[in-house]
């Protein structure tokens, strides 16, 4: 009989190992069997080797049957009691010792005691004398799996590679075990052919590659920065295991390949299907729309995201929202998010931008207030130019003294000093002109002097 025990905890995300331990009751009498190694199997003219295989003796068969029954019933305490009693026998042969170790290893494994399981399984391979080749070789593979589960990847490779030499046609799972071990050791060039072979063997059987296997192959290409070869693998994941995460991964590959239009199309398709739900996803889509010169779409995404609460009302989002509206020439609508962004910014740059926007709309009072906030917050690229703009707003409001004082301040900045001086003269001239206009007009004498003859 064959007992299959699956590893309970998937210790690694890309590949789950399954542990297969062969437990069988051989013939009562020892027999001679003919065996071939891998090289002899290819050379028909070579003479076969003959090997004597031991078996469980008659007096112990019933004990092993009871052990098997307890084990299959998951009655581990009873199985252990029987094993301990049998192990005390002094005349056990090698196959009986191997079977005891095999059962003990299975019990330890069922209890998640991997060190104990490994110790017992290694006892099976301590000698080849009297042990059937199939049983011995299978234990090599089992030990490799346990070592992998313990994250002892180099040791796991050693046992797996020894086992490979005994097999004419290794299974797809075996190739994947070796492939992932190399991957965990960051030996990507060695990992790749094994993973490819494992998947190919699986496909040859008419099966869809396992999700974890495709993920592993995709990760290898990512580590090698080979995004062109990674793309078709992710497409398979999307086709066979449709998940949002794979769609996002595919979009990310388009980004790595500098294909912004296809990346935008991917994000837009996910948005249309209601798959984009997080702030970062929606902000990414808005930014992509901006890069593809679709600012109105970007502004709508930001508007809905902020209104629904999916996006935080923070500096970053308000700034992007206002930029999208400006690019879409929705100047008035852009003022509110820009004002909110400016209030949260650490410097006055956004207040300066807000002030300039008000200036463009001839909203002088609001412009003056925003520019004053910009100057007070500081951190401007050109404080002098902002002062010039503020003086202009004051001038337009006929606040001539305030405007002149602002331009005097601007004179201290070399780049705008001449401009400020010109403004000062202009303000003073305007003040004089208005003063003259307001001056009383002298009365004109309309009396007619008598004509002198």
Image: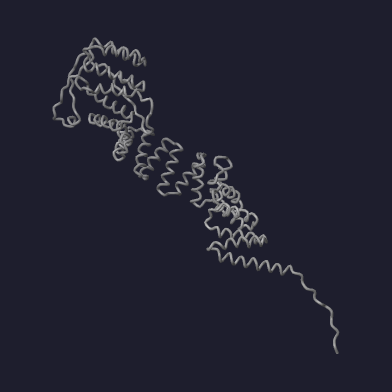
Is residue 107 positioned above or below 382 on the image? above
User: In the rendered image, which quarter is residue 71 located in?
Assistant: top left
Closer to the camera, 83 or 191?
83
User: In the rendered image, which quarter is residue 413 located in?
Assistant: bottom right
Res. 354 in view: yes
Closer to the camera, 108 or 62?
108
Left or right of residue 280: residue 164: left
Q: Identify the residue at image location x=35%, y=41%.
A: 223
Res. 204 in view: no
Q: Quadrant of the N terminus?
A: top left
Q: Position of residue 303 (x, y in %)?
A: 57, 45
Q: Position of residue 52 (x, y in %)?
A: 17, 19
Q: Identify the residue at image location x=30%, y=40%.
A: 189
User: In the rendered image, which quarter is residue 353 located in?
Assistant: bottom right
Q: Identify the residue at image location x=42%, y=46%.
A: 254
The count of marks equals 0
Left or right of residue 316: residue 447: right
Q: Position of residue 97 (x, y in %)?
A: 24, 17
Left or right of residue 13: residue 86: left
Q: Position of residue 13 (x, y in %)?
A: 39, 33
Is residue 300 positioned above or below 140 on the image? below
Q: Quadrant of the C terminus?
A: bottom right
């Amino acid at each position: 009989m064959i007992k299959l025990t699956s590893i309970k905890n998937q210790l690694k995300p890309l590949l789950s190992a399954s542990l297969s331990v062969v437990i069988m009751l051989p013939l009562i009498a020892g027999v001679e069997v003919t065996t071939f190694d891998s090289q002899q199997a290819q050379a028909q003219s070579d003479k076969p080797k003959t090997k004597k295989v031991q078996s469980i003796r008659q007096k112990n068969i019933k004990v092993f049957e009871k052990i098997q029954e307890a084990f299959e019933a998951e009655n581990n305490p009873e199985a252990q009691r029987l094993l301990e009693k049998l192990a005390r026998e002094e005349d056990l042969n090698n196959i009986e010792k191997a079977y005891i170790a095999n059962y003990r290893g299975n019990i330890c494994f069922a209890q998640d005691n991997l060190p104990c399981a490994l110790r017992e399984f290694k006892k099976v391979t301590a000698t080849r004398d009297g042990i059937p080749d199939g049983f011995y070789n299978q234990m090599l593979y089992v030990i490799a799996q346990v070592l992998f589960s313990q994250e002892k990847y180099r040791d796991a490779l050693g046992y797996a590679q020894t086992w490979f030499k005994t097999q004419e046609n290794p299974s797809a799972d075996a190739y994947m075990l070796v492939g992932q071990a190399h991957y965990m050791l960051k030996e990507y060039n060695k990992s790749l052919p094994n993973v490819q072979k494992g998947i190919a063997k699986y496909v040859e059987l008419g099966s869809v590659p396992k999700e974890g296997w495709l993920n592993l192959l995709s990760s290898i290409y990512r580590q090698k920065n080979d995004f062109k070869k990674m793309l078709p693998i992710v497409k398979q994941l999307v086709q066979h295991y449709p998940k949002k995460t794979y769609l996002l991964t595919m979009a990310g590959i388009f980004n790595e390949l500098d294909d912004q239009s296809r990346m935008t199309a991917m994000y837009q398709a996910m948005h249309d299907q209601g798959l984009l739900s997080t702030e970062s996803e929606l902000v990414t889509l808005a930014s992509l729309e901006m890069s593809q010169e679709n600012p109105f779409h970007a502004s709508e995404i930001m508007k809905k995201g902020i209104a629904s609460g999916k996006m935080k009302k923070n500096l970053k989002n308000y700034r992007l929202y206002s930029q999208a509206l400006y690019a879409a020439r929705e100047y008035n609508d852009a003022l509110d998010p820009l004002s909110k962004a400016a209030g949260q910014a650490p410097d006055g740059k956004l207040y300066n931008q807000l002030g300039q926007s008000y200036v463009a709309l001839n909203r002088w009072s609001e412009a003056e207030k925003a520019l004053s906030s910009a100057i007070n917050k500081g951190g401007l690229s050109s404080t002098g130019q902002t002062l010039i703009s503020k003086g202009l707003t004051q001038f337009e409001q006929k606040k001539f003294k305030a405007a002149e004082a602002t331009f005097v301040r601007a004179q201290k900045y070399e780049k705008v000093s001449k401009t400020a001086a010109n403004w000062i003269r202009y303000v003073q001239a305007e003040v004089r002109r208005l003063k003259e206009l307001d001056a009383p007009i002298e009365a004109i004498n309309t009396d007619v002097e008598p004509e002198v003859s």
